[in-house]
């Protein structure tokens, strides 16, 4: 950055460039857009971020993000408590909700098993999942994991870990394209894959 | 957005999606990244935005953005006060500074003349430019405007408006690609175009 922009603007640009999808150039463009729209964008966004930082927490039950714990899904009495959909991250949970194809509850793993990245079972919320399933109320666990090597490794691991509990373990149908991240799929594909889910 | 994400997160995503270069999907990814990196990214960015909103202002002389008025460039005694470089927007000023090819001062027009968009001379900071030039200290005005129809229309208009003042009016050499926005050029191209500038 040019020294002439001043340390406040440089700090803003530097932090914006850490957002996924924003490189240094688009971070500069974003900073300018923010400074031009001070009342309409900059102040509201600063406030929304402060509010989110202060109020959004992780649901102790499913791992979702919400201002309440348990989250809105976990505390919704209209949700089918016999169904748990396992997702990698909160973004995939949001994608499932947008698709509107699932009326049970969720379990956010917080990642995938990965030999390459050294992510083992203890790094994920697998113990909590087995604990929830062991309560007796759950009849089916739907694994909504990406059709990648790590996604499938994780699915097999979970199917083994849940084998002793007596619940049905299913996975999304292969409507999910190979290598596809759930968060990037259109809602129709997700809904179709949910309807056609099959035993894992 | 899914209702399950909660109004705070939905508001954050909605505001993030208004940043240039961030669509709804990357806004969701950004919101998630922010919530995951609360201490390292979310809180610092909220603070940087509040600070910028409170402290950054428009330089009354040149139209740049800075925490001081006059801005750092306008108040730098090492800058050549006989040279003014006219740019469309602050982003172009930053690009010029990054290129390090200009040691005079700037004048930010705040846009370009555009018959199509109905932008006339009164909507731009043209009167202020003529006023600055009429002070007698300025010897050369370099028009660093994009090589687009509107950019060239504006350059001709400014050359006419400054014709009576006796200053030399030059423009960047055609190193600037046709249709190219300054803000997206590499520093070397900008530096070369500045060195090879010619009369307008
Ligand atoms: Zn929950
Ligand atoms: Zn200035």
Image (cartoon, coloured by chain):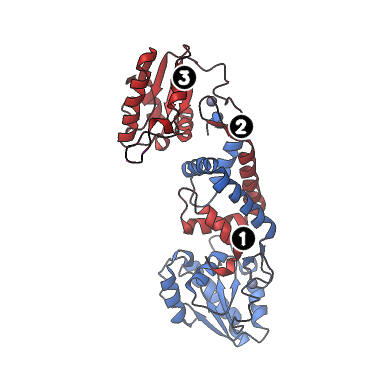
Chain colours: A blue, B red
Residue under the image location 57 percent in, 20 percent down: B76
Q: Is residue B115 magenta?
A: yes
Spot occupied by residue A186 in the image (x, y as percentages of width and height)? 42, 68
Prevailing secondary structure of the magenta residues = loop
Which contiguous range is marked in magenta?
B112-118
Q: Left or right? Give the position of B116 relative to B76.
A: left
Q: Earlier in the sequence, mark 2 or mark 3?
A: 2
Above or below, B197 relative to A124: above
Which image quadrant is residue B113 in?
top left
Identify the residue under disc 2.
B67
Disc number lying in front (3 or 1): 3
Given residues A35 and B46, the one toward you in this image is A35
Spot occupied by residue B67 in the image (x, y as percentages of width and height)? 61, 32
Tag 3, which secondary structure? Answer: helix
**Disc 1 sits on a residue from what chain?**
B
Q: Are marks 3 and 1 in contact (CB under 8 Å)?
A: no
| Real-space Cα separation, disc 2 to disc 3, in angstroms | 24 Å
Spot occupied by residue A150 in the image (x, y as percentages of width and height)? 51, 67
Same chain for labels 2 and 3? Say yes or no: yes
Given residues A50 and A142, the one toward you in this image is A50
Q: Earlier in the sequence, mark 3 or mark 1?
A: 1
Q: Left or right? Give the position of A81 relative to A188.
A: right
Given residues B101 and B172, the one toward you in this image is B172
Q: Are marks 2 and 3 in contact (CB under 8 Å)?
A: no
Identify the residue under disc 1.
B8
Residue A9's tag is: none
Residue under the image location 42 percent in, 13 percent down: B139
């Amino acid at each position: 950055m040019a020294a002439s922009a001043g340390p406040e603007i440089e700090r803003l640009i530097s932090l914006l460039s850490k957002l996924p999808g924003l490189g240094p150039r688009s971070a500069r463009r974003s900073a300018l857009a923010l400074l031009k729209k001070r009342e309409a964008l900059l102040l509201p966004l600063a406030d929304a971020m402060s509010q989110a930082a202060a109020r959004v927490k992780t649901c102790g039950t499913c791992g979702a993000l919400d201002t309440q714990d348990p989250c809105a899904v976990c505390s919704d009495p209209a949700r089918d408590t016999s169904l748990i959909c396992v997702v990698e991250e909160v973004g995939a949970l949001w994608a499932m909700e947008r698709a509107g194809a699932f009326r049970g509850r969720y379990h956010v793993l917080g990642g995938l098993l990965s030999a390459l990245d050294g992510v083992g079972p203890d790094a994920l919320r697998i113990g909590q999942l087995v604990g929830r399933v062991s309560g007796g109320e759950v009849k089916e666990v739907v694994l909504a994991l990406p059709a990648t090597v790590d996604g499938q490794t994780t699915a097999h691991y979970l199917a083994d870990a849940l084998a002793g509990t007596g619940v049905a373990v299913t996975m999304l149908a292969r409507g999910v394209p190979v290598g596809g991240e759930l968060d990037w799929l259109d809602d129709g594909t997700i809904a179709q894959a949910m309807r056609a889910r099959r035993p894992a």
